[in-house]
Image: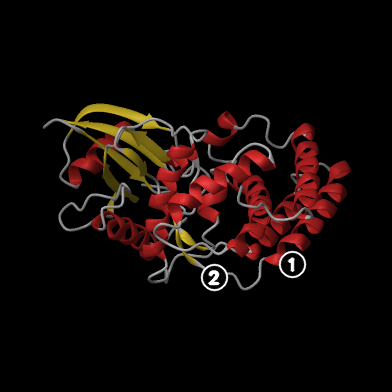
Amino acid sequence: MASDRSRPYECLTPDVVLDALESAGLRGDGRLLALNSFENRVYQASLEEGGRVVAKFYRPSRWSDSQIAEEHAFGAELAEREIPVVAPMALSGRTLHEFKGFRFAAYPRRGGRPPELEDEKVLEWIGRFLGRIHAVGAAAPFRARPALDAESFGTEPRDWLLASGLIPDDLREAWAGVSAHALGHVNAVFGSVRQIRLHGDCHAGNILWTDAGPHFVDLDDARMGPAVQDLWMLLAGDRETASKQLKSLLAGYEGFRSFDREELRLIEPLRTLRLIHYSAWIARRWDDPAFPAAFPWFGTQRYWQDRILELREQVAAMEEPALAVG
């Protein structure tokens, strides 16, 4: 049975994965390929009848059934409007299944390559679909899934880390001070922001590109939040480069939905929240054997020194004018 404690996937053997799929009507031929995922466990399975599916086994206790149902419904809503999002398969009338304590969903396998974000036409193309995703996302709210806010992504993980004993004693005061300073800047601008349903984790790794264009995968972090959350992680480089990339994204985006330029002031605060939340996320998952193997540098003296410097840089970035459209 699945455990929701320190080693939630200890019993998720290849046989269990195959038996789970068979319980949903998908008979595998024995070939499984583990795909890159830390929060959940994701496998590509070849089927006896031909073809392949992707099976996603949800981390126990992270999402409720109703929250997963909202993720699946959002994906289906987007797919029905011919927006290229990979939605879960309905098998026996259901998208969420359970086997031996593990909740899972199956998805059609969709291949692709990373998008070339240096190409302004690629960014414009992605922007068009993000505009369409957000037009749907703005039509109704999530009821069960949480929102991206300064409390849950900043204050709470900061307090948890300070109480955890993981920060070296000689660096604790410095990290506490700079994180408090950074969150002060976040709270100063993170007020009455219009929130819509978002992809939530729209970085290049969650966009696959084919000759037909982009398709979006992994709505696991879908939540309520400001529209700019799905844009800023696609920007890279110095301010001039990021400004030009933003111009290309919005050239496509605004063909389908208007974008409030006031949200650009949230880019660096959102980056700051992500950095604080990321440290707490790794720390909270440390008993999962996949995490020490993937993040061997976590918790070292150098790690926390780098986080202090990173947050100081974020404070400076938040004190600069908001990014402009190039």
Q: Residues within 10 Å of mark 1 (few under 14, many from 20)?
A: few
Q: Is residue 298 left or right of residue 110?
A: right
Of 36 and 114, nearer the camera is 114
Residue 25, percent from left and from top: 15, 45
Name the residue that disc number 2 marks.
194
Q: Residues within 10 Å of mark 2 (few under 14, many from 20)?
A: few
Q: Is residue 132 left or right of residue 5?
A: left
Q: Quadrant of residue 282?
A: top right
Do labels 1 and 2 touch, CB within 8 Å? no
Which residue is most to the left? 49
* Numbered badge on residue 188: 1
Residue shown at 44%/49% (left/top)? 127
Q: Is residue 189 left or right of residue 89?
A: right
Residue 139, percent from left and from top: 38, 70
Q: What element does badge 2 sit on? A: loop
Q: Quadrant of residue 222?
A: bottom left
Q: Is residue 60 visible?
A: no
Q: Is residue 6 visible?
A: yes
Q: Is residue 175 above or below residue 223?
A: above
Q: What element does badge 1 sit on? A: helix
Q: CA distance from mark 1 to mark 2?
A: 16 Å
Q: Amino acid at mark 2?
A: Arg
Residue shown at 20%/53% (left/top)? 90
Residue 30, percent from left and from top: 22, 27
Of 163 and 307, nearer the camera is 307
* Numbered badge on residue 28: none
Looking at the picture, the colour scheme in use is: secondary structure
Residue 106, percent from left and from top: 27, 45
Q: Amino acid at mark 1?
A: Ala
Which residue is most to the top? 31
* N-terminal label among 1 and 2: 1
Q: Quadrant of residue 291?
A: top right
